[in-house]
Image (spheres, helix red, strand yellow):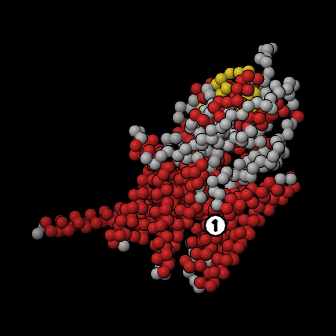
């Protein structure tokens, strides 16, 4: 008789224990829903504080942003006098930063880490609003913080995440009042307008998505369709007006300073490319006006002319091999798993994105036909996140298939994958065997893509991670607020370049770097006369040699720095290969001042005598 009551009490205690554990888990998740953003913020501050001064890439985009900001501070006009590659708001915040704190490489890094922090918070708020799951929201946001994307290009993932959040709030999620719904639509328009001012191509993509959501919103929001059509139409018109109005002060400034034609021209160029379907064209701003180059300042005068360029110098054909994607077969044929993982994460979105778009498009249409409003909202949430993240897909897949550019795409794509997995479990678990197959498929592919990405990218500093801190214990101090930690070998190389340029060139004298090392100009505080700071075998014009010799004769740079690295990971992209005639001319007419790692520094003057 005593066994039965004991068994009963044991079962009851077990149930109470399970109930307590379940209640605790629910309470913890609810706390994360309310306060998880504080954890994300704290993680970002503590994490980035560990390595915000670690490393310095001579060919990094931080040098480009800094040098262009200095040019704009000196009065040069964007696009007209100096090539941007992106739109003006990529650089204006850096100009404003330098106006406040002075030119500072460390301040520049802090600024971009602040953008990384905002990206993590946007990931959290998006997932929290859609799923109401604290653990999922904090977990994915933490991944975005831990792998923020290549530093100095963090606008890209930020814009993807910003537009996901604003477009969902404006057109997919129901707000408490009509006024709030319209206010969110206007906010989405401002987000799209800001995107245009940073990257015109992305602005176009997000405009298309916004217009599509404006059409779909009346069929998923509650209320009478005709009333909702009016609401969506009004909100979308106001959103577009807000995007245009955001451009007004920038346009008026451009008109006052005389580069309004170039500013508007880049939009017209992109509209033309979209209209004709030429998506394989160059990204960023319009082509440089013929014959435009920065005028040398007073400090740029030189005492000795450089050797004259020979106009009849022979030209060689340029091998224009660009950076190649790894073959899909590399994902299972390469001997090292780490390398196989890279090939896999490059190509997985090509499989995952169309499959997920297909699954959730079909289910979205089915939910609409069955008038299942909540389900249609969930499906459209996933489709919106996928669409916004895919705006960053061409940049890495077609142009630069490498870890830095992949990491820009993956930050918003991680949010899309998380939403897809959540939606699959939420909506297909009651659909029997077919639903189980869909759940397993979506979860497996999402976890595989995200897992391989984290495995491969977190150890790489090119993805913006704390890997930059590894073995960097030696401080390098230079001009313009450069105070960074380097490895011992890096310090020796950069210190050598810095000391040579500072002692053998004068303030205001030109230094040019081929193919791309703008950070040298910044830390040496010496200008470059090049309209576009970047050149490689894929972008050099047919007359590069003749034009370069003419510029050398005109501007007589005090020093020329050549980096013979394989910029596109092939022999043809070495400067000494694709620009062999120019390289030989420099070696003949300038003398080698020193070689520091990959950097060959050639000087115009004769070796100076020490006092």
Q: Judge from the rendering whether residue 291 lies leftward or rightward of residue 362; answer left or right.
A: right
**Mark 1 — residue?**
208
Q: Position of residue 463 (x, y in %)?
A: 55, 44
Q: Judge from the rendering whether residue 334 lies leftward or rightward of residue 195; answer left or right.
A: left
Q: Quadrant of residue 244?
A: bottom right
Q: Position of residue 301 (x, y in %)?
A: 87, 31
Identify the residue at horizontal 44%, vertical 57% (top origin).
446
Looking at the image, residue 423 lies above or below residue 108: below
In the depicted view, which residue is nearer to us: 410 or 275? 275
The quadrant in which the C terminus is found is: top right
Q: Quadrant of residue 495?
A: top right
Identify the residue at horizontal 60%, vertical 71% (top origin).
213
Q: Residue lying farthest left? A: 1
Looking at the image, residue 217 lies above or below residue 6: below
Q: Is residue 49 visible?
A: no
Q: Is residue 505 visible?
A: yes
């Amino acid at each position: 008789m005593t066994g039965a009551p004991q068994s009963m009490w044991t079962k009851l205690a077990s149930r109470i224990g399970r109930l307590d554990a379940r209640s605790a888990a629910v309470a913890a998740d609810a706390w994360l829903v309310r306060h998880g953003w504080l954890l994300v913020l704290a993680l970002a501050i503590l994490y980035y504080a560990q390595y915000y001064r670690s490393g310095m890439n001579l060919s990094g985009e931080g040098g480009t942003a800094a040098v262009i900001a200095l040019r704009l501070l000196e009065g040069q006009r964007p696009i007209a006098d100096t090539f941007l590659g992106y739109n003006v708001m990529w650089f204006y915040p850096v100009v404003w930063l330098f106006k406040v704190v002075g030119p500072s490489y460390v301040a520049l890094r802090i600024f971009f880490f602040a953008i990384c922090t905002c990206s993590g918070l946007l990931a959290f708020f998006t997932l929290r609003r859609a799923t109401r799951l604290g653990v999922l929201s904090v977990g994915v946001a933490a991944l975005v913080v831990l792998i923020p994307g290549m530093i100095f290009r963090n606008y890209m993932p930020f814009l993807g995440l910003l537009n996901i959040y604003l477009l969902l709030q404006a057109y997919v999620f129901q707000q408490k009042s009509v006024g709030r719904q319209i206010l969110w639509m206007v906010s989405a328009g401002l987000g799209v307008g800001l995107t245009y001012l940073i990257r015109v191509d992305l602005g176009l993509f997000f405009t298309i998505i916004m217009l599509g959501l404006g059409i779909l919103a009346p069929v998923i929001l509650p209320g009478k369709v005709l009333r909702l059509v009016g609401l969506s139409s009004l909100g979308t018109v106001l959103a577009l007006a807000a995007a245009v109005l955001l451009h007004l002060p920038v346009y008026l400034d451009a008109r006052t300073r005389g580069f309004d034609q170039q500013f508007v021209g880049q939009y017209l160029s992109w509209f033309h490319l979209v209209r004709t379907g030429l998506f394989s064209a160059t990204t960023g701003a319009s082509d440089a006006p013929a014959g435009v180059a920065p005028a040398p300042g007073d400090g740029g005068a030189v005492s000795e002319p450089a050797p004259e360029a020979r106009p009849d110098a022979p030209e060689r054909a340029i091998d224009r091999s660009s950076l190649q994607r790894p073959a899909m077969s590399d994902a299972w044929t390469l001997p090292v798993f780490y390398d196989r993982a890279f090939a896999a994460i490059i190509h997985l979105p090509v499989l995952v994105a169309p499959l997920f778009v297909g699954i959730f498009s079909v289910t979205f249409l089915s939910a609409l036909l069955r008038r299942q409003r909540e389900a249609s909202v969930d499906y459209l949430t996933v489709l919106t996140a996928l669409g916004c993240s895919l705006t960053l897909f061409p940049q890495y897949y077609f142009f630069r298939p490498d870890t830095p550019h992949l990491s820009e795409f993956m930050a918003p794509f991680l949010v899309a994958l998380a939403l897809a997995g959540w939606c699959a479990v939420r909506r297909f678990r009651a659909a029997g065997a077919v639903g189980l197959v869909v759940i397993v498929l979506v979860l497996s592919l999402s976890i595989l893509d995200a897992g391989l990405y984290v495995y491969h990218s977190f150890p790489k500093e090119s993805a913006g991670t704390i890997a930059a801190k590894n073995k960097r214990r030696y401080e390098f101090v230079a001009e313009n607020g450069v105070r960074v930690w380097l490895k011992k070998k890096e310090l020796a190389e950069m210190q050598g370049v810095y000391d040579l340029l500072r002692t053998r060139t004068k303030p205001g004298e030109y230094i040019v770097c081929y193919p791309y090392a703008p950070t040298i100009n910044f830390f040496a505080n010496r200008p470059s006369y090049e309209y576009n700071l970047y050149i490689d075998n894929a972008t050099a014009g047919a007359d590069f040699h003749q034009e370069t010799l003419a510029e050398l004769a005109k501007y007589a740079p005090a020093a020329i720095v050549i980096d013979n690295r394989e910029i596109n990971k092939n022999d043809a992209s070495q400067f000494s290969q694709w620009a062999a005639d120019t390289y030989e001319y420099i070696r003949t007419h300038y003398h080698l001042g020193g070689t520091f790692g990959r950097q060959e520094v050639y000087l115009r003057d004769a070796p100076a005598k020490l006092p």
